Amino acid sequence: MRSQQHILNNLRNPIAIAASIQSRKRWEQFFIALGWFSLLVALLTLVFLVSDLFLRGLPMLNWKFFTSPPSSDPEEAGILTAWVGSLLVIFVTALVAIPLGIAAGIYLEEYAPKNWLLDFIEVNITNLAGVPSIIYGLLALGFFVYILNWGESILTAGFTLALLILPVVIVTTRESLRAIPQGIREAAYAVGSSRWQVIADHVLPYSMGGILTGIIVGISRAIGETAPLITIGALTFITFLPDPPIQNEFPYISFKWIWSPFTVLPIQMFNWVSRPQEAFQVNAAAAGIVLLVLTLAVNGTAIYLRYRFRKSIKW
Amino acid sequence: MVEQPLPYSTKLPVALPSRTVRIWRERIIASILFLAAISSVVTTLVIIYILFAETVIFFEKVMEMHQESLFEALVEFFTGTDWSPLIEPVGIGILPLLSGTFTTCFVACCVAIPLGTIAAVYLSEFAPAKVRELLKPILEILAGIPTVVYGYFALLVVTPFLQKIILGVQQFFNPGKEPWEYYELPGFNMLGAGIVVGLMVLPYITSLTEDALQAVPLQLREGSYAMGATRLQTAIRVLMPAAASGIVAAYILGLARAIGETMIVAVAAGLQPKFTFNPLEGASTTTAFIVSVSLGDLPHGSLEYQSIFAAGIMLFFATLILNVAGYFFSRRYREVY
């Protein structure tokens, strides 16, 4: 009680009040400075990271770097096999993850009865989103590579990354479906549409913006993912390209490439970073620039799309 | 004009499929969608099956090799301080991997939790709207950088910087010696790797904490301001307790990411398993071990092949517990209001 009396006495003293206000203001100023410091740490990380990459790697970035395979001579080494591999793996990933993710999202949001099964699937997806990517690598190694016998191929890699980004696609699909007002569905039902017609003709087209954003975010994550592909045994040094998908003879389209061994950009960069020779660090930086520009461009597209769709639709 | 009633047998311009066809089509579509939704559960089951099956073979082999019972093998696994499944004599104590994981995560949390919380409180309660709109995409950019690029950053930028700082501090307190007489931070160390993991986790913690603070109803702020509290007092004494479960969820999810982070530690923390809690040393984490073994030629069915699953199962359950805890914490804060 004495301390309360003390406070009350102070409250009667205008000088004490002014001093108290002063000290609280100082604390607040101090905290604002602290807040700026914290944000500055994040900003400076970005600045240092990008500037170091560019200062070191930019001289290496020329046409030759993109068109030569890796080599034991750092001057000669390039990222041809890496970017072709990345492209093909991401293609398979998209082919698997997009239909599967959208379908799962539609079921969970539009069909699933609200019961324990839905709860269970929900917790499960949340958990899968948090499973470390290397665990997906172990899953792929044990299941795709040895049980299904797909080997260390582009197909295995594509499926692995697809499973990895599936939670992202499902969650964003659900969120954008949820944003469609109920009235749209009711109107479509009122003219006699079936459930699937309501979804395919109305709900899905209107929510395409949000779904697209989710897909792009997932793809950008897949581009940068390294660990699960190392686990399934993606080669770190590969000098030949997979079979071209388009052939000169009948039937013109070949699917042999999905079985071929591969490397991807992040693995190529990892390989160069972990070499002791100084000269390879330049290559690593150059590959880092390519990787960074690629993922940032893809991410930027997603941010832009989200911004545009949020602005343009008014129900 | 009087409206005419429609004739009794008006033909629709398109032929509709019969009712049965419609019903069956709907059923087929619904079951295809259901199968897609179930795929996530199947993925989890396959993960658990693969991890368990290979770990069981791992222990069978160890029991045969060391001539010991399952109990003794498990005791050795959880209490042994020698992890060397690749070289004879085989050591299967998991503690060196756990100590490496713990140390890097501890360093990462020391960076990410204070900075992330302060940044979130600042962004949510103090920052002008323009600053917030500008900084949120930048934080998203940080979260989108591939982790192998962060690994490069840790090894080639942060570690040399730390080496200079540590040398400078020693020269300041104990001057007059030749440069090589001072302690030098090794090129692979858990401190640099941990700091960068913290920087990588920072955007997640900031954005989740900010979400939790934003979810606190406005009346609570107004009530606090009405009592004469400043913004800082409101934030610390009213908003943070109100959003506590959301903030704890943010920390837990950040921790789970730090534990599972692979490429940064594989590049910058070293690949040699070592039982130490000293961040100034290099050591291998669970994830880095899996990467280092996978890099070599990994014969299917060898002990090293199974050892990565035994290490993986520890990682899986650690992150599983954290993820579920995070999920329930964040659920609780949503239900409060």
Image (cartoon, coloured by chain):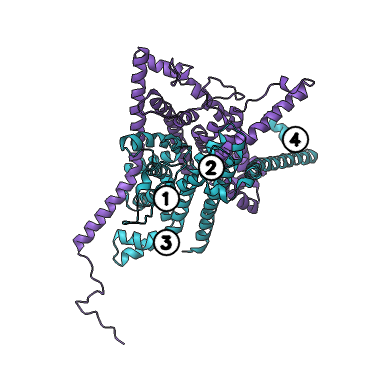
Q: CA distance from mark 4 to mark 2?
A: 59 Å
Circle 4 marks a residue in which chain? A
1 and 3 marks on the same chain: yes
Which residue is identified by label 3?
A: A206
Q: Kindly indicate whether the residue at mark 3 contacts the one at mark 1 (C-beta within 8 angstroms).
A: no
Circle 3 marks a residue in which chain? A
Q: Nearer the viewer, mark 2 or mark 1?
A: 1
Quadrant hosting residue B115: top right
How far from the left and from the top, in percent, is residue B232? 66, 41
Classed neighbour count for the residue bearing mark 3: other residues with Cα under 10 Å, few (<14), some (14–19), many (≥20): some
Q: Kindly indicate whether the residue at mark 4 contacts the one at mark 3 (C-beta within 8 angstroms).
A: no
Q: Nearer the viewer, mark 4 or mark 2?
A: 2
Q: Secondary structure at mark 2?
A: loop
Q: CA distance from mark 1 to mark 3?
A: 25 Å
Q: Nearer the viewer, mark 1 or mark 3?
A: 1
In the rendered image of the structure, the colour used to display chain A is cyan
The answer, for residue B216, to whether it is visible in the render is no
Q: Secondary structure at mark 1?
A: helix
How far from the left and from the top, in percent, is residue B17? 22, 65
Check residue A91 in the rendering and tell me which mark sits there, or answer none: 1
Which residue is identified by label 2?
A: B146
Q: Which chain is purple?
A: B
